[in-house]
Image (cartoon, rainbow, N blue to C red):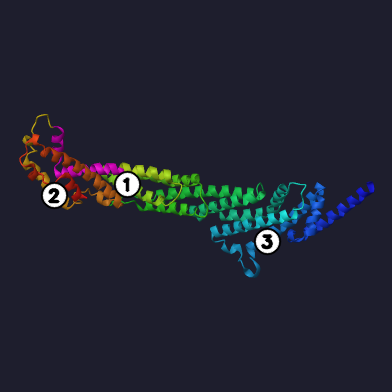
Amino acid sequence: MEQMASFQETALERLYRWTQNQCRNIDSPDSNILLTQAISCLQDRPVLLKYVVDEYCTVRRGLVARSFLDALTVGGPHGTPRPIELHAHDPARYVGDMLAWLHQMTPTEKENAQALLKGCDKSDISELVKGALANITEGVCRPLRLRLEQVISPDIGPAALHTLSGLIRFYLNTIGEVVPNSALIETLNDIFDQCHHTFLTSLESHVQRLLERIQPPSQDLSPSLGVNQLLNLLRDVLSGGHIVDAKPSDVSDVVSRVLDPLLHLIEDTAGRLPRVDQAAYTLNCVYQIHSSLSLYEHVEERLENLQGLMENQLALLSNEQATSLIHSLGLGPVCTLLQNQGDGELLSNIPGMDSSSLQSFLVKLDALLGAPDALQLAQWKLLISGSQRKTIQRRALDTVLSIYEQLFDAVHNPANCYENPSSIMPRTPQQVRNLLA
């Protein structure tokens, strides 16, 4: 038995040397059946098995590193594909091509490691494969880090940096499923953190610079050029994340860093205007922001807040428009008299409510029915949104119609003793509503 044990040790030693030599000159473990069988025999000696796997990983690590550098500088066979570094002037493509190369390499190396160890039924192959992949991919970390750090610079702008952050995060998650807990993943994590931090810094710098360019509101109460430039910046940044599914928290953070200072500045500049001008200018700016933001996902809460802000301005302008219409039609005294009519008091005997006085209001009402836009506020005509103009006009006219309906009922009420009320107010409230509609 001692002699057999000696023979066995000698055989394992020879097998180990042969296996090591094979690992140094192997292209694809799947094509070498003898190597797979040899490694399965070595699993009875875990130390020898570890040495063989380490030798394989050392060889593959060097080959992968050289292949990565060749892909960067030389390209593929006969120049196809072209060297990745030819696209160094385009940060998104440059980084995307490098990470895509790694994304293609890692599954191939995983399959090779699994083929090499498929005969090891006495060990946990998955852990051996993970360890081997972490070892093999370590060789590309340094050249990858150097090139990514050269690309990540505030000079390329927040939109490009946001695109790079999305690319790195996407490939970080994808490659991390194949090679978890490895130096490659640590490298990508570090680079992502650096890129995201640089992006936020660059975004805040650009926002601050554009805020300083925003001019006071012009006479047409439209958003200034600086407001549109900030919205263009936000659109460029959010559009840059189309490559991957952005996290809601990231989108919210980006939107807040742009819109919060913008809305604060709009409120500050609008506060110097008269009340109605202030509402119209704020409404135009918020409408522009809402329209730009509605094209993107994960901004529902922000859109609701903007909608509430617009509703406040719409209510203010509607009230101002209704007040202006009541004044222009001479309905102010009528409203007061209708509300303050005492019990038993004949409305037709009150000064200002007699038939001749009501004719003046009805003549103005006929003019309004012929040209509903004629008595609108000047600020109403400066609103960007046609639907908002219609909303303000409808609400103001509804107020006038409500007063007209009360007056119509009062005139046609026999208790108020109007002579021939149908000749005084021939149109019913519904007829007036239809004409205005």
Q: In the depicted view, which residue is nearer to us: 173 or 164? A: 173
Residue drawn at the location 9% of the way across and 34% of the way down: 415
The residue at the far front in this view is 414
- Residue beneath label 2, please? 366
- The quadrant in which residue 85 appears is bottom right
Q: Position of residue 182 (x, y in %)?
A: 67, 48
Residue drawn at the location 42% of the way across and 54% of the way down: 232
Q: Is residue 201 left or right of residue 142?
A: left
Dot 1: element:
helix
The residue at the far left in this view is 419
First-in-chain label (2 vs 1): 1
307 magenta-colored: no
Answer yes or no: is residue 272 visible.
no
Are discs 2 and 1 less than 8 Å apart at CB?
no
- Residue beneath label 1, please? 283
334 magenta-colored: yes
Select label 2 or label 1 by which is in front.
Answer: 2
For mark 2, does the 10 Å Cα neighbourhood hold few (<14), some (14 to 19), or many (20 or more) residues?
A: few
Are discs 3 and 1 less than 8 Å apart at CB?
no
For mark 3, does the 10 Å Cα neighbourhood hold few (<14), some (14 to 19), or many (20 or more) residues?
A: some
Are discs 2 and 3 less than 8 Å apart at CB?
no
Q: Position of residue 164 (x, y in %)?
A: 54, 54
The magenta region covers: 313-340
Q: Please tell me whether the stretch drawn in magenta is mainly helix, strand or loop.
A: helix
Q: Is residue 146 left or right of residue 273?
A: right
Report how far apart the C-alphas of labels 3 and 1 lie in the structure: 58 Å
What's the residue type where badge 1 is placed?
Answer: Leu
Q: Is residue 316 left or right of residue 29?
A: left
Q: Is residue 170 left or right of residue 17?
A: left
Q: Which mark is residue 67?
A: 3
What's the residue type where badge 3 is placed?
Answer: Ser
- The quadrant in which residue 75 appears is bottom right
